Amino acid sequence: DMMIALGHDYLSKINVAAASNVINTCLTGVSCFAAARQTGKRKYAKMADRCRSKIKKWLDMGNPNVKHYGSILDAEAMALKGKTFEAIKNYEVAILLAARSGYQQDAALASERLGEFQISVMKNTEEGGYRLREAVKYWAGWGAMAKVADLEK
């Protein structure tokens, strides 16, 4: 709610051109899409769409390092719209792009989101469990052992 009140571009205005803006924009988008799905509130979906548009703008400007972020947010948008197979495809593309580009933490995030989606929406605990185990491997490879312990609970 604070980010919505401050505006979607608040951080980029105070921290122009910082690499952390890209990561923050993606994570804000993911969390807002999740909040929109859980609460049904349009304000979260609007904020998430702004984040998605910003990532797409950076991609259109030629930044190759944001392609997997775009796929993650596309997956979240499709999940919100109930387009399950498009969501799954975008999650899988995000995992592949992130892993191939060396963004292990982003492959972990996309794997975790896909696992949760498979379990909660698709009711596919086998595939969801597999994706969560893959997320654990990525998080462990990145050295995020607290996250690994949290997911293994």
Image (cartoon, rainbow, N blue to C red):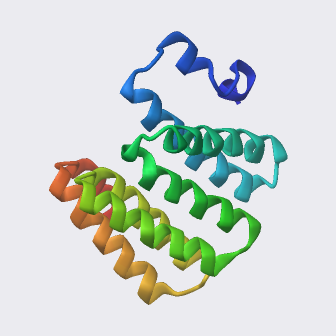
x, y percent for residue 13: 57, 14
x, y percent for residue 139: 25, 56
> Which quadrant, please, contains the C terminus?
bottom left
> Which quadrant, please, contains the N terminus?
top right
What residue appears at the point 19 percent right and 51 percent down from the top-left corner?
A: 142
What residue appears at the point 58 percent right and 39 percent down from the top-left corner?
A: 57
What residue appears at the point 57 percent right and 54 percent down from the top-left corner?
A: 73
x, y percent for residue 31: 58, 46
Q: Is residue 3 visible?
A: yes
- The vertical placement of 56 against 123, above or below, is above
- The vertical placement of 102 against 89, above or below, is above
Choose between 64 and 54: the one closer to the eye.
64
Choose between 59 and 145: the one closer to the eye.
59
Rendering quarter of residue 47: top right
- The vertical placement of 71 against 17, above or below, is below
Q: Residue furthest top?
A: 14
What residue appears at the point 48 percent right and 15 percent down from the top-left corner?
A: 16
x, y percent for residue 33: 66, 52
